[in-house]
Image (cartoon, helix red, strand yellow):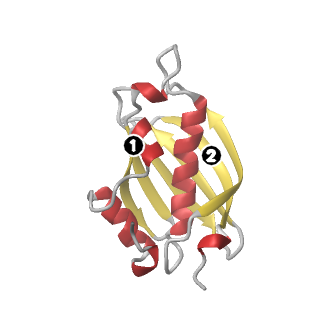
Amino acid sequence: MTDWTQRSPIEILDAMRDGELPPWPQDELIGLSVGAAKPGVVELRWDPTPEACNPAGAAHGGYIAMALDNAVCMAAATLGDTFVPQLTMSLNIDYLRAVLPGTAYTVRAEVVHPGKSRSVVNGQITDPTGKVAAQAHASVTPNRAFLPA
């Protein structure tokens, strides 16, 4: 088990990207992984697995929402001194085109309004050509159970 208070949020996400820390189980299930992180911005890589797909062969909308939710929460978490998981207050998604297995997508989220009790974050899923497959607008708040004492 990692002591999340011993590393900055960027260090934790970099360690996940580099395989030093394991991915979260739900991310591994659907093919989502950390790409890059800097304060207020996170990029994830997503190659949807068959487990993330509906019978029609496209990623299920719930998994698209999960990928965007993870990205917006991680982006907000990068702004703290320690990694504090975020709770989603609202998540509004526009589904624009199919997300298909066998394609490497980028899930990017950026904080547009940082706050101590509420941050506003925008996210997008783009295909390799830069076309937006889905976008999100979210409000998140730090999970107080993880705040340093």
**Quadrant, the N terminus:** bottom left
User: Which residue is nearer to you in this view: 97 or 119?
Assistant: 119
Residue type at mark 2 is: Ala
Name the residue: 31% across, 64% down. Answer: 15
Is 44 located above or below residue 97 in the figure?
Answer: below
Q: Residues within 10 Å of mark 2 (few under 14, many from 20)?
A: many
Asked whether the viewer can see residue 100, the reply is no
- The numbered mark at residue 78 is none
Considering the numbered disc 2 on the image, is that residue within a helix, a strand or a loop?
strand
Residue 92, image x, y percentages: 70, 44
Residue type at mark 1 is: Glu
**Quadrant, the C terminus:** bottom right
Q: How many marks?
A: 2
Name the residue: 36% across, 71% down. Answer: 11
Mark toward the start of the polypeptide (2 vs 1): 1
Name the residue: 68% across, 76% down. Answer: 116
Residue 73, image x, y percentages: 57, 58
Quadrant of res 7: bottom left
Asked whether the viewer can see residue 15, the reply is yes
Of discs 2 and 1, which sits in the foreground? 1
Is 83 located above or below residue 47 in the figure?
Answer: below
In the picture of the structure, the residue carrying the numbered disc 2 is 136
Compared across the picture, whether 140 is left or right of 35 comes to right
Considering the numbered disc 1 on the image, is that residue within a helix, a strand or a loop?
helix
Q: Marks 2 and 1: CB-CB under 8 Å?
A: no
In the picture of the structure, the residue carrying the numbered disc 1 is 28
Is 88 located above or below residue 107 in the figure?
Answer: below
Residue 18, image x, y percentages: 26, 59
Q: Residues within 10 Å of mark 1 (few under 14, many from 20)?
A: some
